[in-house]
Structure formats: C-alpha cells, structure tokens
Image (cartoon, helix red, strand yellow):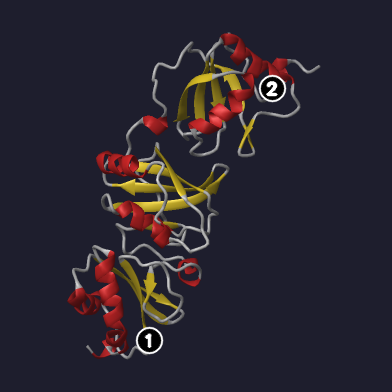
Amino acid sequence: MTSVSSQPQFRYTQPPSKVLHLRNLPWECTEEELIELGKPFGKIVNTKCNVGANRNQAFVEFADLNQAIAMISHYASSLEPAQVRGKTVYLQYSNRQEIVNNKSTGDIASNVLLVTIEGVEASDVSIDVLHLVFSAFGFVHKIATFEKTAGFQALVQFSDAGTASTAKNALEGRIIPRYLLPEHFGPCTLKINFSGHTDLNVKFQSHRSRDYTNPYLPVAPSAIDGSGLAGAGLDGKKQEVESNVLLASIENMQYAVTVDVLHKVFSTFGPVQKIAIFEKNAGCQALVQYPDVQKAIISKEACHFCLSTIANF
C-alpha cells in the first residue's frame, strides 16, 4: 500500500486538526461545495472560502477531530482524489485548531454579488434580464455570467456594498418576474451571496459579460449575431427583452456619424447617459443608454425614421 507521505495530493507536515486546508479549488468555490465535499465524513461547522493570492484555497472546520482525520485518511488511501468541479483538491491538516473568522466570504458584505439562477440553463436568462432585475436597486456597473456545477451563475457589481446588500436582501429567494421570461419557463429562483471580488475584469461587451461604465469597450461579434447586446434593436431584426440600452444600426450612410450627432437625435426623447459607436459588417452601429427602460422604448418607437435620415444632419 502506498504510504501517505508519497501521495502528491497531501502535505503531511501538520499534526491532526479539526481544520483542514484545501488547495487548488475552482475559482469562486462556494461554502456549499465545501460542505458537500466533507459531508460523507462528518459535520462541517465553519468554512473560510476564497483565500490565498489566487483565491483558490479554503479552510473547513469539522465538529470533531476524528471526522477531519477520517477525511484525510480516506483520500490518502483512495485511488480517487478529492475533487470539486472536476478539479483535484489538495488536502492537509491546518496549523490552526479552529477558524477564528466565523464568516465565510459569502457572508461578508461586498459590492459584488454572486447570483445563482436555479431552474434554468445558461441560455435561458439573458444578461439584459439580469440587468433589469438588479438595476431596480441602483446603478449596475458590470455583469459577468458563467456556468458552474452549481448551475447558471452571474457576478453583479454595484458601486458600493450598501447598494449590493439592499439588492441581496430584496431578491434572495425570490423568482425572476414571469413577464421577463418566455411563457413556457418555470420559476427561476435567485440564490444570492456576496462575492470576494470588488471589481470585475470585463474585457469586452458580449452576451455573457457587460461593463455599463465603459461605452468604448470593444463589442464581441457574438453580442450582435447571437442573443443581441441591446434589449431592443433598431434594425428591425429579432426583438429582444426590453432594456434601457438600445442597439442602433445606421444604414446607407453618406456622411460620418459622430457621437454628437447621435446625442442630438436620441436626447430628443430623454436624457442620454452614454453612447458608443462601432463598425459592424461595414456598417455603423451604436449603443445608446437611457436612465430607464420607458425612455428607451419611446426613443426606439420614434427613431426608426430618424435613423434613415440621420446622415443628413
């Protein structure tokens, strides 16, 4: 039988402790995933998630020392390593006998929320729907969506922890309004924790990530060709969920279209917050952001004619 010391999964340098140190965890590993990993061996009474430089380490505390020993012993002799989301997790006893901080990352107030949307697939709920839901509580800076073992998840960034706390308290356990989803959908429940992040790194606007503070960020082709970046397009194509951001396509251009020209047109129907212009398929398109959905709807309905003559301004 292979000795414990030769197992690369372990660092057998600490005396037994109720607290185990876990390394090589997936990004944004949750407390629930850690509890699930330790459940066969006993009751986990405390956790500390997302620690270390890469936020891929954690500590778990069992109720009894023998439970922690059982987990270490099991994986030391097993051919199957401990895994979370398919990643091998490295285990060792911690040099601490208890986790002093009784709050996991998910309990510490942050300006970024980790949202799990239960009962849906990743393509079922658009980023625009999430933006509409969370914008009711304050200005949403950024959103990034992704798929994990826990399901379809999103990181939603607000300007401060207070605004994020308000949104979390109001939406935790609630369902997304049915009128925002297709008729055949069942209830989509929101499960919300605080994230350990404070500023999301969004490199481009797409149907999976969005930075509402940077109108000049590059736009991924999939954002237009796929589910659509804006909630309502002005080019007569696929109708999307209503949003406070419009996607405008200017066809048959004879002269250059500038931000000032677009602002002159769209501000007729309400205060324009941001405008971003980019080229797509040799044409000109723009993102126009209003403070609310209603003003965007009014502008959309009125601007079909304006866009056809915009080059004459």
Task: Using the rendered view, name the quadrant where residue 251 is placed.
Answer: bottom left
Residue at figure coordinates x 30%, y 65% from the top left: 244
Q: Is residue 16 visible?
A: no
- Crowding near pointer 2: few (<14 within 10 Å), some, many (20+)? some
Look at the numbered disc 1 and give the secondary structure of its residue.
loop
Look at the numbered disc 2 and give the secondary structure of its residue.
helix
Find residue 187 and report its horizontal and vertical position in percent.
48, 52
Question: Is residue 266 shown left or right of residue 7?
Answer: left
Question: Is residue 104 shown left or right of residue 255?
Answer: right
270 vs 118, nearest the viewer: 118
Query: Where the N terminus falls, by quadrant?
Result: top right
176 vs 2, nearest the viewer: 176
Residue designated by label 1: 251
Q: Is residue 173 visible?
A: yes
Residue designated by label 2: 75
Instruction: Give the vertical position of 273 relative to 68 (above or below).
Output: below
Residue at figure coordinates x 57%, y 11% from the top left: 14
Question: Is residue 177 shown left or right of residue 39?
Answer: left
Distance of label 1 from label 2 (alpha carbons):
63 Å
Query: Which of the labelled discs sits on residue 172, or is there none?
Result: none
Query: Where the C terminus falls, by quadrant?
Result: bottom left
Find residue 222 and report its horizontal and vertical position in percent.
50, 67
What amino acid is labelled 1 in the image?
Glu
Residue found at the very far right of the displayed protein: 1
Find residue 174 and report its horizontal and vertical position in percent.
40, 45
Q: Earlier in the sequence, mark 1 or mark 2?
A: 2
